[in-house]
Amino acid sequence: MSALTVSEEPDQNWDDLVRFWEEMEWPEGSKVEIIEGIITVSPAPGLPHNVIAARIQRRLYSAIPEDWEIFQTLAIAVPSRLGMLIPDLVVTPLPDHTESDTHIPAALAELVVEVTSKSNARHDRVSKPAAYATAGIPFYLLVDRWAPGGPTATLYGEPKGDVYRVLSAAKFGDPLTLPAPFDLTIDTGEFPES
C-alpha cells in the first residue's frame, strides 16, 4: 500500500479532496480511498480476501430486504473524518437519488464489512471504524485475518461518537451472529486462514 498526500496546505478542504479523488487517473485495478485526509492507493486484494467477502455476501443476501443491496466497490463518504472509504462490503437500502454517482453518504449504510490485508490492517482496525462510527453506521464487521493470536471476526455496533461497542467476536471456526435486522449466523469455519 502506498499513500499520496494531496496537499500540505492547511486550508485544503473536503471538496478539493473529493474532486482530486474523482478526477485523477489511478492505476487500473487499485483501490483508492481517502483515509483521514490522505489519498491511499492499495493493490486489489488477493484470493483468500475475496473468498471471505464473497462468502459473507452470499449469506447476507438471504437476510436482507428486497430493497437493500450489497456492494463490493461502492465508496462511502464521511466528510467530517475526511474519509472516502471503500469497504469490502457495504449493505445499504437503495437510495432514491444521490448527489454523486461516485459515492454515497456513509450514513445510508446499515452494515460495512472489512477484511484485513496485511498492509492495511491498521486502517481497518483504527481509522475506518472511527469514521464508520462517526457516520452512525449501525454495524461494522471486521474480519481480521492478521489479528494477534490468530484470525478473528468481530461485530461492532452501538456507535457513539467515533467509537463502537463490541457486540460479538469469534475465532475462525466459530459461528458469529449478526442481530436484527439481519438475524444471521455466519460460519467463520468457511473462511480461508491464509
Image: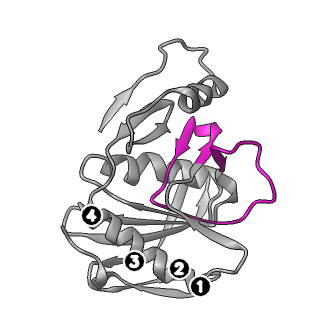
**Whole-number angstrom distance, CA of label 1 to CA of label 3:** 13 Å
| 2 or 3: tag closer to the N-terminus | 3
Task: Name the mark on residue 97.
Answer: none
Q: Are marks 2 and 1 in contact (CB under 8 Å)?
A: yes
For label 3, the crowd category at 10 Å Cα-Cα, with few meaning under 14, some 14 to 19 and many 20 or more, is: some
Instruction: Read off the magenta span.
Output: 76-104
| Quarter assignment of residue 79 | top right
Alpha-carbon neighbours of circle 4 within 10 Å: few (<14), some, or many (≥20)?
Answer: few
Q: Quick one: which residue is furthest to the top in this view? A: 9
Q: Which residue is mark 2?
A: 60
Q: Position of residue 179 (x, y in %)?
A: 57, 83
**Pointers 2 and 3 in contact (C-beta within 8 Å):** no
Q: Secondary structure at mark 1?
A: loop
Above or below: residue 169 compared with residue 94: below
Q: Is residue 141 above or below residue 190?
A: above
User: Circle 4 sits on which residue?
Assistant: 47
Kind of residue indicated by mark 1: Ala
Dot 4 or dot 1: first in sequence order is 4
Is 153 positioned to the left or the right of 148 in the image? Answer: right
Q: Amino acid at mark 3?
A: Arg
Q: Position of residue 169 (x, y in %)?
A: 38, 76
The residue indicated by pointer 1 is 63
Q: Nearer the viewer, residue 52 or 47?
A: 47
Going 56% across and 25% down the picture, which residue do you hit? 20
Identify which amino acid the numbered label 2 is placed on: Leu
Nearest to the eye among marks 4 and 1: give it.
Answer: 4
* Above or below 142: residue 168: below
SS at mark 3 in the image: helix
Q: Which residue is mark 3?
A: 55
